[in-house]
Image (cartoon, rainbow, N blue to C red):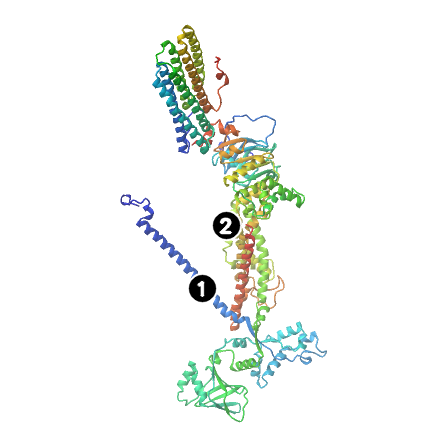
Amino acid sequence: MLDVNTFPAPERLAGLSKVPCASAAPVPETGVKPKISARDVCVFYSGKQALFDVDLDVMPNEVLSLIGPSGCGKSSLLRCFNRMNDTIDVCAVTGTITLDGQDIYDRSIDVVELRARVGMVFQKPNPFPKSIFENVAYGPRIHGMTKDKQELEELVVASLKRAGLFDEVANRLEDSGTSLSGGQQQRLCIARAIATQPEILLMDEPASALDPIATSIIEELIDELRENYAIVIVTHSMQQAARVSQKTAFFHMGKLIEKGDTEQIFTNPVDSKTQDYITGRIG
Amino acid sequence: MTDFSNQPESANTIHTGVAARRRLKARYRSEWIFKTLSFSAIGVSIAFLLFLFTTIFVQGWPAFTYNFVQLPLELNETTIGNQNGISPESIHNADYDAIVRTAIRAQFPQVSGRSAKRALSGLVSPGAPVLLREALIEDPEQLNGQKPLSLPLSDFADLYLKGQISHSEYRTGTAPVNIEASSGNFQISGTALLSALKNFTNPALQGAQQENSAFNAGIALDRDMPSILFYANGGVLKLETLGPGFASARALLPLTLTKNPEVVDWQIRLIEVPEANRNFSDQEIVWTDALVERQLVQSQFNTLFFTKGASREPEMAGILGAVVGTALTLIVTLSLSFPLGVAAAVYLEEFAPRNRWTALVEVNINNLAAVPSIVFGLLGLAVFLTFFGMPRSAPLVGGMVLALMTLPTIIIASRAALRAVPPSIREAALGIGASKMQVVLHHVLPLAMPGILTGTIIGMAQALGETAPLLMIGMVAFVVDIPGGFTDPATVLPVQIFMWADFPEPAFQQRTSAAIMVLLAFLVAMNALAVVLRKQFERRW
Amino acid sequence: MSQTPSPHIVQSYEDELAELVRLISEMGGMVELAIINSTMALVRVDHDLARKVAGDDKKVDDLQRLIDEKAVSMIARRQPMAADLRRIVASIHVATDLERIGDMAKNISRRTLRMSDKRMAAQLYSGVKHMSEMVLSQINKALDTVTSNDVEACVRVVRADDEVDALYMSLFREFLTYMMEDPRNITDCTHLLFCAKNLERAGDHATNIAEAAYYVETGGNLPSDLEAGIIEVS
């Protein structure tokens, strides 16, 4: 965890009061522990603050969607969950993010292992320029997850099946991953992400580059994957967030404005900014 | 701009009005001018290139064939053996000069006098005895096989046979002439001779003829005049003076004379370049022609050029030494600069933090790429030779110097190639949980390979043609033996070319061009390799 | 939320919503006029007016269908969220309720046509007239709450329905008295009783409109004890 005092933080951070976040439903104390917990998370790019004191929980077997206008910080938050922000030199993260109760920024955490447990799917499908089989097998191979070739093959086939791609590529696993259509490529990326058997899936606008049919297939896939994973999805399409997620969090200019059940956010949000955004008003 | 008040009904006259059409025309015209200039630039470049290649080719092509003579040689116990008979030791120690001398003199037994004999021996290359020894040592069975051994002619004989000594004109006799011999001199009389001579359009001869139009005095055909040779009865006479109605001559090749002085079949030949201006005398010409007539001379592929090292004799000079030296040097250069360059580029691009130190390093690398190559030679001289005491003129040192020179090129090209790999691939690999090293090795490097290879080949091609730095570290040595290892003295092709261009013999000029052709062939081969390798890697995209 | 929301970025969306509101107002105006005219026709036993009111009901029905179509079209094309969604869905409900009120007015007029063409005693119809005025006021106020975003007004309208119900009960007893007094009044009183019933139901529909407005404004429903009503209606 990056300590505010050791990192050259801007002066205004010292006097910043916590931004109140509207939440219609209090966090349910039903005994289910959140998979990922974020508390007081702030993100800075070259000293300029992009996210202000975010408190958020991701529950297992649930889809949480992060919505908000461009540049509001939702992708930044998403990338904090698997420490992809580490790859950006000018980015600094403060606050606590825990995975199953363990602080992921702790020095004892191996970021490589973290990224195997927290899978990521990106906006533009980016399969490796290798064969379809190799794309999916790469993760398990570098993490040494399988003992022999047969196990690896089974894992690849299972991942492809779970991603709903196996039927379409069963007889051409040696073809290049880039020879597939956009929607198939994205499903390949999903298969690749779940091949390392993660516990959480992070999806950064996974369907934004796809046509409506492919989008529907991905949404159906997300619904199925929900049985096994906690999923966090960043999306620009409110309709998609409304269709796909159970919980929604609305961000605006780096602040978490409102979070709650998806149904409630889209039928009767509490905060006027949320209302303005989801009804398409100039807020 | 557009005056809306007097525009007609059409809505978009901004683009369809008269002014607009004019502007469009002007745009097209300037584009056309640009295209024409570009094409003519390309055309001029191609024209120059063609000119260059044609010149080199025309000059160098004759060097790829050489005229060899197959003299019957006396290879027996007397000449090769010693008191114990023929043994490898005796083969090694035999006097091959004598064998060759004897063989060539046997062709023209009538030759007498020390200088004439020396000239006759000079028809065969001085390296012939060496070759003969090598051939016999390699395969002593040739002694018994009676297979005639090919010996190279001298460089001038070869040049003559390739028509590079002088142009000749021939006239066949139309009417018989009389030949009388007296104590070594010959007199040829007959009007047919003079009319044939008048037929020649040689300006020097015609000038002399006009001066002595009345033929009152004789024209002396001395060394500054073109040579005129008279062929008849199996012999050759060289005309020395031209008088009215007759000519005096001396024999270059013995004629058979009968009691009848009349000669019906005769030919005369005018050699344009006077004897004073060439290095091959008429006598030598005649001897060489006789050897050709006896079908002893064959034009073969010039294996000597490709199998021999440097030599003072043009006919014995070959590029193998330089080629091997170049290959060894390039191997050293490649094995040093490629791993270092690629690793440095990977580190600088992927792992190094972005601060002022790395910026400084980057600026320095870019500057090093522009440093004149001779500076690297000085560096090599000072550090490798003087300080470390490494052997001079060795491919190892040359390779190290060239590696220093090539490193910046490779680093810059590799960095550009690495930067061109889209960050989406890196992110995807990182997201799966690959470590930074794995991302670079498994994903970034393979995708950047085409660019890296291109940069490497460019660097290698540059290194291939470098002369200046290698001169500084002493690769000017006259290296006869083919280098066997990295620390043997060697030379490289560009340096070899440079040295040969200095030698005066015309045969060396041919060889220089031929060596340039070999160098260019090397370059083309390297570039072809680069293209193949690039295609191989690019397929994966 | 009491502040006026900023307009939609897409102006045509804003225009369509405004059109929907205008149609509701228009329909409300027609329905109010129908109530006024049907009451007047009843009181004066004016057959011509009654016929006109009954005929004009068709226009109200057409408007209701139009509002329905427009609402469905907007849902399909605009995918409305939150308050917009509630507003559009509520418009459908409000249109339905207004159409029912229009039907009540039509029923009153039809009944008037069956009454014999002579004037009634003033004391007979004064109660109904008063009730009609009260219901008209309810309709008016309910329609206002649809555009006003005033939550308290909605609650007031819902509460005021108790008075309408109470008035109906007292009219009921009054008519019983009149009928018991003079059997010649039975015909008129029975007609008037049915008309009063129609008016009472129109008042209930006005309450529904106010509840719809409440839902649009708050996203929730009125507390149930308000709706229960104190008086049992038979």
Is B422 drawn above or below residue B130 in the view shown?
above
Determine whether the residue tagged by mark 1 lies in a helix, strand or loop.
Answer: helix
Q: Residue at x 38, y 11 (%)?
A: C125
Where does the image place residue C114, in percent across and percent down from the top left?
39, 16
Q: Chain of mark 2?
A: B
Asked whether the beta carbons under mark 1 and mark 2 sit within 8 Å of each other, the answer is no
Furthest-bottom residue in this view: B259
Q: Is the N terminus of chain C in the top left, top right, bottom left or bottom right quadrant?
A: top left
Where does the image place residue A119, in percent across and percent down from the top left?
58, 38
**Residue type pointed to by label 2:** Val
Q: Chain of mark 1?
A: B
* Category of crowding for the residue at label 2, using alpha-carbon neighbours closer than 10 angstroms: few (below 14), some (14–19), many (at least 20): few
- Which residue, given by chain and number where applicable, does mark 2 sit on? B363
Furthest-right residue in this view: B84
In 3D space, how far apart are the residues under numbered discs 1 and 2 (Cα atoms)? 36 Å
* Label annotation for residue B48: 1
Q: Nearer the viewer, mark 1 or mark 2?
A: 1
